[in-house]
Image: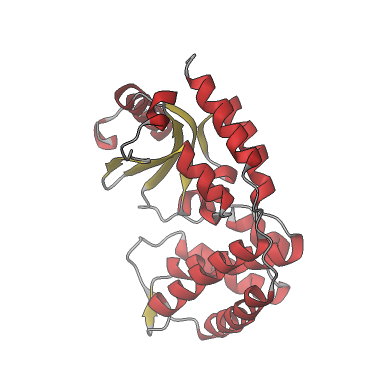
Amino acid sequence: MRYKDFEGTIEELVDLKLKEIEEKENVKILHAIESGSRAWGFASPDSDYDVRFIYVRPVEYYIRLEDTKDFIDWELDEILDINGWDLQKVLRHFHKSNATLFEWSNSPVIYKTTSEWQKIKQVSEKYFSCKSSMYHYYGTANKNYNEYLLDDMVKYKKYFYVLRPILACKWIEDKKCAPPVLFSELAENVLEDEMREVVDNLLSVKMKMSESEKGRRIDGLNKYISVQLSYYKEKAADMKDDRNPDWLELNRIFAETVKGKENI
């Protein structure tokens, strides 16, 4: 069912889709959230909904000899983008301190969650790595800056795809923990005072623009970004490797959650 044919809210439609997934895939969804610009707090009027979920299957699925799929791509259209990861894949990536997963875990827009997920989240926090995450955010900012913000006319939304990860780097440097998902919370805590008016004005303009609209490049903001990228490239390289090498807690919570699936 498409959103334009649905009479309820987007939350009700997502709930319906999640129930369809559980029934047809024989999984239990542990956590489902909004990702991307709507979770970050700077969606355009025509932004789609990026729904991400984490699920667990029955125990026998994990003890097969043949390769098994560890993701579900459910739907992709002009309104909904829905896909999810298997719990086993999620825990392996938490061990690597995958920054995207920490964002899923901390998203302010939650469509569904469970008590099992709260236990998993608590364990995952022991595997957050400042160095790994700063590399991720620096790389994201650098890639988007060089690909999208050097022409005379640029998509203003791309400024926030660069500014947000730069502020995430600042948060990690200052607070030594996973950064919040909302851009406004990052900006309030770590954005320099002299940049606030520029960024606030840009956000106000961007929120009224469609995804494809462009505006003239903001040279002062580009200069700020360039300085920050140079700094965090060196900062990330100089940080010590602080990843947690232990698998014990992740193995324990995986076994506990999968065994619980037998009674669902």
- The residue shown at (39%, 62%) is 209
**In the image, residue 44 lies at what x, y percent?**
41, 56
Left or right: where does residue 250 sit relative to residue 84?
A: right
The foreground one among 156 and 74 is 74
Please give left or right for residue 252 compared with residue 144 in the image: right
Does residue 57 appear anywhere in the picture? yes
Give x and y (percent) for residue 63: 41, 30
Q: Residue at x 31, y 44 (%)?
A: 79
Give the vertical position of 184 relative to 219 (above or below). above
- In percent of width and height, residue 131 lies at 64, 65
Q: Which residue extends farthest front?
A: 65
Residue 191 image point, x, y percent: 68, 68
Above or below, comparing residue 180 to residue 166 in the picture: above
> Which of the two residues, 212 or 34, is positioned nearer the viewer here?
34
Q: On the image, which quarter does residue 135 sit in?
A: bottom right
Residue 58 seen anywhere in this rendered image of the structure: no
Instruction: Locate residue 178 relative to residue 100 in the image: left or right.
Output: right
Instruction: Identify which residue is drawn at 75% across, 65% down.
Output: 174
Q: Is residue 239 above or below residue 11?
A: below
**Based on the displayed image, in which of its 4 quarters is residue 55 positioned?**
top left
